[in-house]
C-alpha cells in the first residue's frame, strides 16, 4: 500500500509501525543492491523515504496515541498550538532521537564540554577532522581578533575558536535550527564566549575585514533534499559563491581555512575538486594543507574497517598577500 502511494495510520502499537518499516526496507533492499554504487544507494534511500513518509502515527495531547509510543519530547515545543494531528511515523522516531540527543548532549573532547544540538541541527558523529583543526589552531600564529565560522551547525568550531582566544567570532548558518542550537548552548555556558550567531547564506551580511574565514563545508557533491542535507551535500556553485564572498571579507593577510575530506573524490573521481578549481583561478594560493587518516568506528564485532578516507585542513591566502 505505502509502496503504491497510499497512506496508512498505525493505531495500535509502536511495534506495528516498526514492523511495517522493516518490511518496506526489505522490499527496497530487494529492488536495489545495497552493495551498489553511491547513486544506486541514494536512489534506494529516496524510494524508501518517499514510501515511509506515508506511514502515519496519531498525536494526541503531544504524545503518540499508540501503545509504547513516544511522549512529549519536541512534540510540545514544535507543535504548541496543535493537540490532535498525525505525523509520519519516521518523523516521530526522528523527533524522539533528536530530543534524546538534545537532553543528553554530545560530549566533544576537543571542547572539553558537551553541546546540546537542537532538533534539525547537524552535529559531528566523527571527530578526526575536529582534532586536525585543533592541531591547526595550535600552530596558528596570526592575529586572533575577528573570525567568521561559516556554516556553524551546532557551533563546535566557533566554540573551539573561542577556546583558542579569538575575540570576535561570528557564526553563520542558513539553517534556523542551527542558529537556535548555538544560541541555546551559548546560554548554557557559565561565562558567555564572544560568539555572535547569524542566520544567513554563507558569510552572511557585513563588510568587516576578517583575520580568518573558517568553513567546514558539505564534502560530497549531490542533491540536498532538506536543510539538514545541506550539511552533507553541496550543489554546483556553492564553493564559487563562498570564495567570491570570502575574498570581499578577508583582511589583506587573512586566511581561509577549509575542513575537507577526499571522500567526494573517492566517490566521484570524475567531478572537479572544488578547492583545486578555485586555486587554478590565481586569486588565492595554498598556504598549507594538513591531512590525516580518519579513525573508522568499530563495527559490531569491534573491528575497524580499512578506509582510504582522509580528512584535511586547507589554508588559503590571497595570491597578492
Ligand atoms: C558539515 S556541516 C559543519 C558544521 C560545523 N561547522 C562542524 O564543523 O561540525 C556544514 C554546515 O554548513 C551549513 N551550510 C550549508 N550550506 C550553507 C549555506 N549556503 N550558507 C550557510 N550555511 C550553510 C549547514 O547547515 C551545516 O550546518
Image (spheres, rainbow, N blue to C red):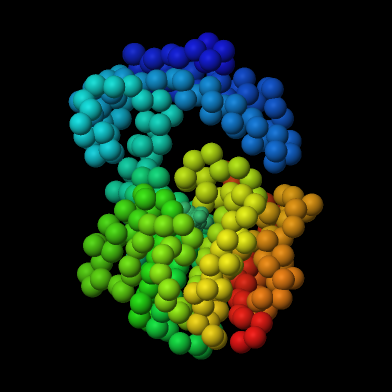
Left or right, 55 with respect to 237, comes to left
User: Can you name the residue that lies furthest to the right here?
Assistant: 270
Instruction: Decide if residue 24 is in sight here.
Output: yes
Q: Vertically, is 234 above or below 283? A: above
Left or right, 89 with respect to 308, comes to left
Q: Quadrant of residue 317?
A: bottom right
Instruction: Decide if residue 73 is in sight here.
Output: no
Q: How many marks?
A: 0
> Residue drawn at (65%, 71%), measured in percent from left and top?
291
> Residue drawn at (41%, 51%), measured in percent from left and top?
175
Q: Position of residue 223 (x, y in %)?
A: 60, 42
Task: State the residue in front, 202 or 14.
Answer: 202
Quarter of the image for the C terminus: give it: bottom right
Task: State the residue in front, 316 or 42.
Answer: 316
> Residue drawn at (55%, 79%), measured in percent from left and top?
255
Q: Vertically, is 6 above or below 224? A: above
Q: Position of residue 89 (x, y in %)?
A: 40, 25
Q: Position of residue 181 (x, y in %)?
A: 33, 54
> Residue drawn at (63%, 68%), measured in percent from left and top?
312
Amino acid at each position: 500500500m505505502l509502496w503504491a502511494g497510499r497512506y496508512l495510520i498505525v493505531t495500535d502499537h509502536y511495534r506495528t509501525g516498526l514492523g511495517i518499516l522493516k518490511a518496506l526496507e526489505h522490499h527496497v533492499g530487494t529492488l536495489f543492491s545495497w552493495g551498489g554504487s553511491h547513486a544506486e544507494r541514494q536512489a534506494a534511500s529516496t524510494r524508501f523515504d518517499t514510501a515511509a513518509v506515508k506511514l502515519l502515527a496519531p498525536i494526541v495531547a503531544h504524545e503518540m496515541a499508540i501503545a509504547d509510543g513516544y511522549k512529549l519530547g519536541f512534540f510540545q515545543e514544535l507543535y504548541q498550538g496543535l493537540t490532535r494531528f498525525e505525523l509520519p511515523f519516521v518523523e516521530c522516531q526522528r523527533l524522539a532521537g533528536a530530543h534524546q540527543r538534545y537532553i543528553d548532549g554530545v560530549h566533544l573532547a576537543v571542547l572539553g564540554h558537551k553541546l546540546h544540538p537542537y532538533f534539525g541541527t547537524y552535529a559531528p558523529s566523527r571527530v578526526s577532522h575536529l582534532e586536525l583543526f585543533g592541531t591547526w589552531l595550535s600552530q596558528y600564529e596570526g592575529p586572533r581578533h575577528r573570525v567568521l565560522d561559516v556554516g556553524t551547525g551546532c557551533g563546535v568550531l566557533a566554540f573551539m575558536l573561542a577556546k583558542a582566544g579569538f575575540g570576535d567570532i561570528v557564526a553563520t548558518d542558513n539553517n534556523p535550527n542551527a542558529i537556535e542550537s548555538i544560541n541555546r548552548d551559548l546560554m548554557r555556558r557559565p561565562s558567555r564566549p564572544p560568539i555572535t550567531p547569524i542566520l544567513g547564506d554563507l558569510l552572511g551580511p557585513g563588510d568587516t575585514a576578517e583575520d580568518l574565514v573558517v568553513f567546514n563545508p558539505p564534502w560530497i557533491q549531490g542533491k540536498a533534499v532538506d536543510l539538514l542535507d545541506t550539511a552533507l551535500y553541496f550543489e554546483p556553485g556553492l564553493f564559487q559563491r563562498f570564495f567570491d564572498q570570502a575574498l570581499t571579507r578577508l583582511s589583506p593577510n587573512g586566511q581561509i581555512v577549509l575542513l575537507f575530506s577526499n571522500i567526494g573524490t573517492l566517490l566521484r573521481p570524475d567531478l572537479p575538486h572544488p578547492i583545486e578549481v578555485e586555486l587554478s583561478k590565481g586569486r588565492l594560493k595554498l598556504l598549507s594543507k594538513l591531512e590525516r587518516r580518519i579513525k573508522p568506528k568499530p563495527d559490531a564485532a569491534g573491528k575497524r574497517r580499512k578506509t582510504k578516507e582522509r580528512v584535511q585542513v586547507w589554508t588559503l591566502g590571497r595570491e597578492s598577500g
